Amino acid sequence: MGRLTRQIGLVALGRAAGTLSILIVNAILARAWAPEEMGLYSTAWVLVNTLVPLFLVGLPTSLLYFAPRRSPGARAALVLQATFCLAGSGALLAILLALAGPWLASLLDPGGTRGWEGLADCLWPFLPYAFSLVAGGLVEPVLVAAGRSGWQAGLAGGLAAGLAGVAWAGQALGLGAAQVLGWFSALGLARLLIAWWLVREALGGPRQEGHRGGLGECLRYAFPIALNDAVGSLSRSVDRFVVLGFFSTATFALYHLAAIEVPMGLLLGAAATVLVPEVSRLYSEGRMQAIGELWRAMVRRLSTAALPLCCFLFIFAGQVVVVLYSERYSGAAWVFRIFLLVLPLRCALYNPVLVSMGKARWALWGGVGDLLLNAALSLLLVQVLSARLPEYAHLGPALAAVASTYVQVFFLVGLIARHLGWGVRELLPWDHLLRVGLFSCLAGLAGSGAASWGRTPLAELALGGAAFAGVLGMAARLEPRYRQAVRELFRF
């Protein structure tokens, strides 16, 4: 178990480094470029990162299932076959984006008044990076399956540091969006070559001849995974695509920089590691009461972190945006606030619990419903707000994304409650949620008052944060149940 925990920690560390690097890169480039250029850069980034999961065709996850079941020689053959398959898929993605660049620019801006005419010039230098992401899609599962999680964490950390370094150099040298994206591509290709070499070493050198990898079986298994990944990727980006279609590059930059979810991935990943195997075992034994208790314990722990964080960031969203991106993006604060409303939903796992109970298809249908509802609501709200409150029209897709997420979660929670034979009132620890919510609001009031003494956004954030933390610390000392919940948070 100790070895498994170490591997989980290393993978999570690599992913955390990647998430942090994207935030740092955006913060550096937003200060270096005008919003119009930042909008073109953001468009290229969103397009590539939305399409990559589709072109991975579910092979990375499928390989995690099949690789341990193969002999060393057959495993190496399977990895080689899958690598060639993904290299072809990555090349296809690059070709399609190259052909679509000018068409997308004319589609988004037929009149040439919204600043999209330079989209193709920004997209073309970024195509090798898109290829490298798809062609190297097997690296993480292969290294993890081979017990080389440290190599994977080092590779992810190196790419994260490289991206931040290129952004810093681009700011210092006055490079434009196309040039920075070109250097990102060079970095991505270098990472791909190193990754392929590491995979070769992890598999024990050259592949032995005479082994059949079984790529066809792997692809058949991957099909439903690919479908689920595609739905999830499109669901996360559909609101951005609506903003692309209706607004200028400057407005898209403002929206994209602020439309971020606070990363609760580390806590959720730790929870999934503990919860999913246990739920699967308890469900097979018919112990529904035990599953419900486990669910309540998970919600209690995660909400202890998520609710105070949501409250603090909602109150200080304006200061956070200005400190990260400068005053020119101060108008993005309400986009950030709207997306923060999703944070309380991250107090629980939904799809993994359904999958562990053998209901993976229902999780997929929940994702499809979220995608369709998100798209429809985004289009509707943009049209309505453009006609009545045009200055707030760009908030429509954000509202739609949050609303559709709530509908999806209510649907999934209802399914979970139905299979456990519990009502929603029994499924959630309402007393704990109300207690943490009350303490968070009190801390928010204290933080807001303390921030009024600051003369800059950074000073307001520091003073408000200190007061906020002080009130929560006092609550933990005075209220035993809250103190116990804080301690439990770190015991996954």
Image: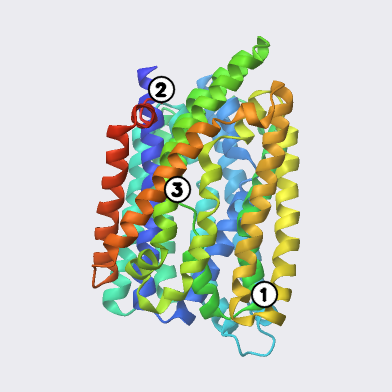
Q: Position of residue 473 (x, y in %)?
A: 28, 40
Residue type, numbered disc 2: Leu
Q: Is residue 296 left or right of residue 310?
A: right
How packed is label 3: few (under 14 Cα within 10 Å), some, or many (20 or more)?
Answer: few
Residue in front for this viewpoint, 272 or 340:
340
Q: Which mark is residue 245?
A: 1
Q: Residue at x 62, y 73 (%)?
A: 244
Look at discs 3 and 2 and give the one toward the viewer: 3
The answer to whether the residue labelled 1 contacts the one labelled 3, judged by CB atoms less than 8 Å apart, is: no
Q: CA distance from mark 1 to mark 3?
A: 27 Å
Residue type, numbered disc 3: Pro
Q: Where 478 sits versus 378, above or below?
A: above
Q: Secondary structure at mark 2?
A: helix
Q: Position of residue 342 (x, y in %)?
A: 55, 51
Q: Residue at x 40, y 66 (%)?
A: 26
Look at discs 1 and 2 and give the one toward the viewer: 1
Q: From this viewpoint, is residue 83 visible?
A: yes
The answer to whether the residue labelled 1 contacts the one labelled 2, judged by CB atoms less than 8 Å apart, is: no
Residue in front for this viewpoint, 380 or 112:
380
Q: Position of residue 418 (x, y in %)?
A: 74, 27
Sequence-first tag of 1 and 2? 2
Query: Mark 3 sits on what residue?
Result: 263
Sequence-first tag of 1 and 3? 1
Q: Quadrant of the N terminus?
A: top left
Q: Quadrant of the C terminus?
A: top left
The answer to whether the residue labelled 3 contacts the one labelled 2, judged by CB atoms less than 8 Å apart, is: no
Query: Mark 2 sits on what residue?
Result: 4
Q: Residue at x 49, y 53 (%)?
A: 261
Q: Secondary structure at mark 1?
A: helix
Q: Which mark is residue 5?
A: none
The image's colour scheme reads: rainbow
Residue type, numbered disc 1: Gly
